[in-house]
Structures are given as C-alpha cells and as structure tokens.
Amino acid sequence: MTSAASVKKEKTALKIYFNGELIDKEKACVSVFDHGLLYGDGVFEGIRTYGSLVFRLKEHIDRLYKSADAIELKIPMTKLEMMDAVIMTLKANSLKDAYIRLVITRGPGDLGLDPRKCKKPTIFIITDKITLYPKEFYQKGLEIITATTRRNLPQALDPRIKSLNYLNNILGKIDAIKAGTVEAIMLSYDGHVAECTGDNIFIVKKGELITPPVEVGALEGITRDAVIDLAKDLDMPFYAKMLKMDDVYESEEVFLTGTAAEIVPVIKIDDRVIGDGKPGKSTLKLTTAFRELTKTDGVRY
Ligand code: PXG
C-alpha cells in the first residue's frame, strides 16, 4: 500500500468505545479471561439511528441497566454518561444511519464462575452501518416456521434479560435456517407463543392487536413498546394475551417487530397461509406510523 493510501485507511478506521476510550477497531480486543466470553456473563443492547436521531435511546439504556441489575452486574457509569458515550462514538465515526451494539461484560476474572473475581466490567460500544432486510420481505411478507427449540424458562434464565447468553435463540435460528427461512417462532416450555429468535410477534384477530405478555418468556422489545403506543394513538384495540399456535394460524395478520426489522409482515407460518397471504391493513397502517415515529422519537446528535 502506498503511504497516501495507508494514511487514508487510518483516517477511516472504525473507532470503538472501549472502557472509556475511543480506539481503532483492530485494537479493540477482550481478554480470553473475560467472563463475557467464558460464560456469556454480561448484557447488551442493539440500538439504531435514523439520520442523526438515536431511536428511543433512553428506553434502550433503561433496559440495559435493568438487565444488568437482574444479573447483579453494577455498571460503573451513570445512564447519562452511557448515553454520552454512545453519541461520542457515533460522532467519532461520522455515522448517520447506524446500528449500535452496546456490550457490558462481567469483565476479566479467573477460570471459575465466581463473578466476584471480576473486578472491572468490560464496556464497549460498536457503531457501524446497519444491514437491513431486503425490501421484498416488507412488500411480500415473510414465510416463517415454528422452532422445535423452546424458549428459555423464565424461572431459569428470564428472556426479559438481554444477556450475552443467546444460545437458546441461536438454536431457534438454526431451526429457521434448516427450514429455509430467516425467522422462527419460539414457544414457551408449555407451548404458548413467546416471541421469535430476534423479534417480538404480534397478531391481528377480529380487529384486535395482540402480543404475548413478556411474562410468558419474551424480551420487552423497544419496537414492541413503540407499536403498542402507536396502536393506542390509532385507536386500535390492543391486548397482551397468552396465545397458542392455533390462534396465530387463524389470525388475519401476523407481523414481527425488532430494532433492525422494524415491522415486518408474515404471510405464511409452517406452510399455512395467514389471512389472504398478503401484508395486512393494520400492519401497513402501523408501519407508516412507525416510520413517522422514527423521525422524532429519540435523542439527536
Ligand atoms: N426478542 C429478542 C430475543 C431479541 O433479541 C427483540 C425481541 C426485539 O427487541 P427490540 O428492542 O429490538 O425491538 C430482540 C432484539 C440481530 C439481533 O442481529 C436482533 C436483536 C438483538 C440482537 C441482534 O438479528 N433483536
């Protein structure tokens, strides 16, 4: 490489927030003794920016601290400092439409489980370009399956905790991939609909919008909450209700929600056609309202 080219590369190297500093991507490494790596002992957030607006940043940070609290991990920064760190990282990379991955691990310890051996949590923030689902998924709708892998039992590892332990979801994702799809519905241990591997699920039945309560074993998605708020604004009757797969098969509309996916219609599940096999009216109405919300609801930088 010519020296001019290497200078250019250096200038454009992605900066990572790592334990209070902004460092080059190549230098951002965690210890092999970090319990985040050894045991999945830690928490994270996936956040998105629209233009220069971080969508519902405060809500994401609140959920991060709630998850950390649930695993008795004390984050050595205030919520405000954490928000500033996110914005500083975005600015350092001159990113506008970005994906943000915020990770807090228990930190480096020894080879035993004892979290008390980990003296300092590892905190890093990656901001990068976002990879989106193809447009076709939104225009035509998704075909998905029910995973054979059941969602974690809330009494064992509560899915409301956004922890670094995503193996349960990954096993569900493998079920989806084997079936030639990109998402899969995960049921609770006793057969109730919980959520998908990386998205929440909603149905529209007899004109009512319904999603499973998070107590069944689902993440309280930021997008899920935004959709519930929008349903209220749009005078759509909404209920958080326990659902079986038959309720889903027999519904008029199904859609998934997530930070990356936003609102994505589902038109076929386990080879059964949902409604008339096209993205439904309520789904489209909520999608339009959600896109509007992403222009204003968040923190500007
Ligand atoms: N359920 C689970 C299990 C998730 O991981 C959602 C629901 C939706 O939540 P939000 O807050 O985003 O509306 C998620 C979050 C990925 C990826 O790369 C997806 C998520 C998290 C991390 C990575 O596909 N979805």
Image: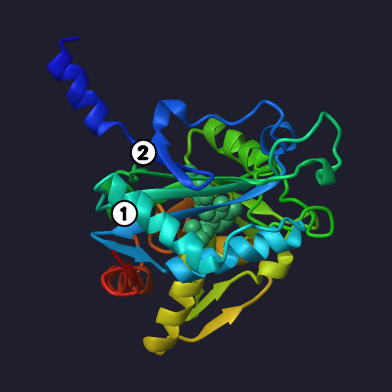
Q: Nearer the viewer, mark 1 or mark 2?
A: 2
Q: How many marks?
A: 2
Query: In the image, is 131 to the left or to the right of 157?
Result: left
- Residue highlighted by disc 2: 15
Quadrant housing the N terminus: top left
Query: In the image, is 271 to the left or to the right of 293?
Result: right
Q: Along the line of sight, which residue is nearer the eye, 10 or 131?
A: 10
Q: Residue at x 67, y 47 (%)?
A: 42
Q: Is residue 99 above or below residue 110?
A: below
Q: Residue at x 42, y 56 (%)?
A: 86
Label 2: state its secondary structure.
strand
Label 1: state its secondary structure.
helix
Residue 72 horizontal/vertical position (percent): 77, 58
Residue 56 in view, yes or no:
yes
The outermost residue toward the top is 1
Is ligand 1 within 8 Å of the beta carbon of the residue shown at mark 1?
no
- Decide which of tag 1 and tag 2 comes sooner along the chain: 2
Query: In the image, is 30 to the left or to the right of 216?
Result: left
- Residue highlighted by disc 1: 138
Q: Amino acid at mark 1?
A: Tyr
Quadrant housing the C terminus: bottom left
Q: Residue 165: which quarter of the image?
A: top right
Q: Along the line of sight, which residue is nearer the eye, 174 or 251?
A: 174
Q: Residues within 10 Å of mark 1 (few under 14, many from 20)?
A: some
Marks 1/2: CA–CA distance: 33 Å
